[in-house]
């Protein structure tokens, strides 16, 4: 059995997938790298097979009809044999030194019989043409280098969100909680991170800059104009997350508060882009989203509305929308979504 499975969803990724694969290979023989070719029409399959032929004990290649990022992750999880599971997008990469530290940490935790359900490390925004890279760490929010529970977490800053980039889940936990990401839908990484959280009983945080999150391609899903065009998919994901748990029934108050914070982020990002688009149709969609939350769970609606961002997203009239637009750059800076 492998220590860590890393899944690389690929769709026409021939121009940049080598970097992701090469950095993951630094994890050695205890790595399992699954390259999922999600219906590519370029040389993705050829490159993947070349890697498999060179590293047959490390790299698996799975070719499937195009189903989108989520379906590629589903396929990777279904075929994973590693104790732990991580997704690395084909245009991103990992820091080799940090990966070796993480692998050693996981190995030691398993040997001690204390392996956590969720292992966390830092991620870095690798924005094109930006010299100073933004590092998202969990200092002051999570205990370091020790097993802990949700009751041990501290205050999360607005920027300290647990994203796919920072998570390494226990494979068995992901499979047992029944996670299945929707096909042909963007932004499913939010479901991947959010849905399993109540199943997590123990966590571990290592303060190393493992994941490098590249931002700079014009067609990237987090590009501002792309997000506005795909806002209906963002709304779909947000509603799925709202329906996935009765947050008010979660026993750990600290986990409950964190999950409310996460949903507040999703509601804020969706609202900001609908306001940014500015049409009457988009403004109606924003109202519909908040009405949907209110009708589905009135207590959760009140909790999210009571937060600063929640209140600001519902200021009335043109003046209110102007104030919200003025706060757009602040929101963008906090969440770093493009």
Image: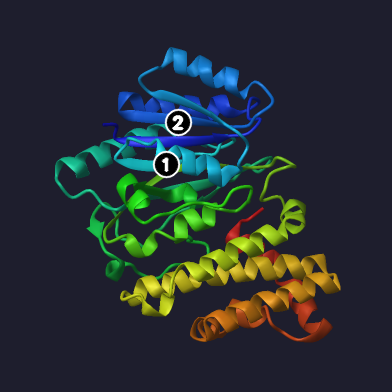
Relative image position of residue 230 (x, y in whole percent): 72, 55
Q: Secondary structure at mark 2?
A: strand
Of residues 314 and 94, the one nearer the viewer is 314
Q: Is residue 87 above or below residue 320?
A: above
Q: Residue furthest left?
A: 112
Relative image position of residue 157 (x, y in whole percent): 48, 67
| Relative horizontal placement of residue 78, taking residue 112 as reference (left or right) | right
Of residues 155 and 66, the one nearer the viewer is 66
Residue at position x 23%, y 38% in the image: 107
| Residue 119 appears in the picture as rendered | no
Q: Residue furthest front?
A: 65
Q: Residues within 10 Å of mark 2 (few under 14, many from 20)?
A: many
Q: Earlier in the sequence, mark 1 or mark 2?
A: 2
Relative image position of residue 5 (x, y in whole percent): 38, 36
Q: Which mark is residue 34?
A: 2
Q: Is residue 27 above or below residue 338?
A: above
Relative image position of residue 241 (x, y in whole percent): 52, 65
Q: Secondary structure at mark 1?
A: helix
Q: Which mark is residue 77?
A: 1
Quadrant of image for the N terminus: top left
Residue at position x 59%, y 83% in the image: 294
Residue at position x 35%, y 20% in the image: 57
């Amino acid at each position: 059995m492998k220590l860590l499975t890393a899944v690389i969803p690929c769709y026409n990724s021939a121009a940049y997938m080598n970097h992701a694969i090469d950095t993951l290979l630094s994890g050695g023989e205890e790595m399992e790298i699954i390259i999922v070719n999600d219906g590519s029409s370029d040389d993705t399959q050829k490159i993947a097979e070349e890697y498999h032929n060179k590293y047959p004990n490390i790299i698996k290649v799975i070719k499937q009809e195009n189903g989108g990022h989520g379906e590629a992750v589903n396929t990777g999880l279904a075929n994973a044999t590693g104790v732990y599971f991580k997704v690395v997008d084909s245009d991103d990469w990992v820091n080799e030194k940090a990966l070796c530290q993480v692998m050693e940490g996981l190995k030691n935790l398993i040997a001690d019989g204390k392996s956590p359900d969720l292992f966390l490390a830092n991620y870095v925004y690798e924005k094109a043409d930006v010299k100073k890279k933004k590092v998202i760490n969990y200092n002051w929010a999570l205990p370091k280098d020790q097993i802990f529970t949700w009751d041990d977490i501290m205050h999360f800053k607005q920027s300290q969100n647990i994203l796919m980039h920072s998570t390494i889940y226990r494979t068995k936990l992901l499979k047992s909680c029944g996670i299945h990401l929707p096909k042909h839908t963007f932004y499913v990484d939010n479901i991947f991170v959010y849905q399993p959280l109540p199943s997590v009983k123990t966590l571990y945080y290592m303060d190393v800059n493992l994941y490098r999150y590249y931002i700079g391609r014009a067609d990237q899903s987090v590009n501002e104009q792309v997000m506005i065009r795909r806002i209906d998919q963002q709304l779909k994901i947000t509603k799925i997350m709202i329906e996935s748990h009765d947050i008010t029934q979660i026993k750990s108050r600290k986990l409950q508060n964190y999950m409310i914070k996460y949903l507040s982020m999703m509601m804020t990002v969706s609202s900001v882009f609908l306001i940014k688009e500015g049409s009457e149709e988009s403004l109606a969609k924003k109202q519909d989203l908040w009405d949907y939350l209110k009708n589905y769970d009135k207590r959760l609606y009140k909790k999210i509305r009571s937060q600063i961002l929640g209140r600001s997203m519902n200021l009335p009239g043109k003046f209110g929308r102007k104030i919200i637009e003025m706060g757009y750059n602040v929101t963008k800076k906090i969440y770093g979504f493009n």
